Image (cartoon, rainbow, N blue to C red):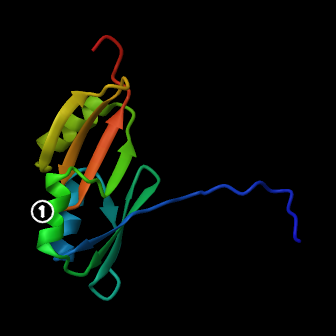
Amino acid sequence: MTSSAIKPRVTSFAPQFLVDDLERSIAYYRKIGFTFGETWDGFYAIGYLDGHELHLKEAPRNEAERQRRRDDEHLDAAAGVDGIESFYEQCVANGAAIVKPLAPTAWGTKDFYIEDPDGNIISFGGRPATGL
């Protein structure tokens, strides 16, 4: 058995979303602040935002499955945000598709959902600013 003095910890964890049109998806995620480098062979891209990654892969998904996920509010990813109100305002101003507006949760935070052009649903949540 091998032992190490370094305690293991996960240093990154990135969702991979399947998308129908890679360039369209890159343009969408740029609206909420992601930056992208060059694509790989025109089918794969990695977006960066505040030290986190989002992987996009051009590979069509089943429309019936997308609709079921939408109807049942199944998330494809969830993200924590400091300054949730400002981030929400930024997303709205930049044209992100809001499917659930910013609202208080039962556990003392606020969250909202967006949907990308391929039906991926992301929840953004965080502690509200004091006094709001």
> Which quadrant holds the C terminus?
top left
> Which quadrant holds the N terminus?
bottom right
Q: Position of residue 62 (x, y in %)?
A: 17, 76
Q: Residue at position x 18%, y 74% from top? A: 23
Amino acid type, label 1? Gln
Using residue 101 as the reference point, say whether residue 52 is left or right of it.
right
Q: Is residue 102 visible?
A: yes
Above/below status of 57 relative to 92: below
Q: Secondary structure at mark 1?
A: helix
| Disc 1 residue crowd, few under 14, some 14–19, many 20+, Cα 10 Å | few
Above/below status of 85 relative to 74: above
Corner quadrant of residue 7: bottom right
Q: Position of residue 34 (x, y in %)?
A: 31, 56
Viewer-proximal residue among 52 and 7: 7
Location of mark 1 (residue): 67
Q: Position of residue 29 (x, y in %)?
A: 24, 59
Q: Position of residue 75 (x, y in %)?
A: 29, 53
Residue farthest to the top, as pictured? 131
Q: Is residue 118 visible?
A: no
Above/below status of 74 relative to 43: above
Viewer-proximal residue among 93 and 132: 132
Using residue 49 as the reference point, say whether residue 85 is left or right of it.
left
Q: Residue at position x 49%, y 60% from top? A: 13
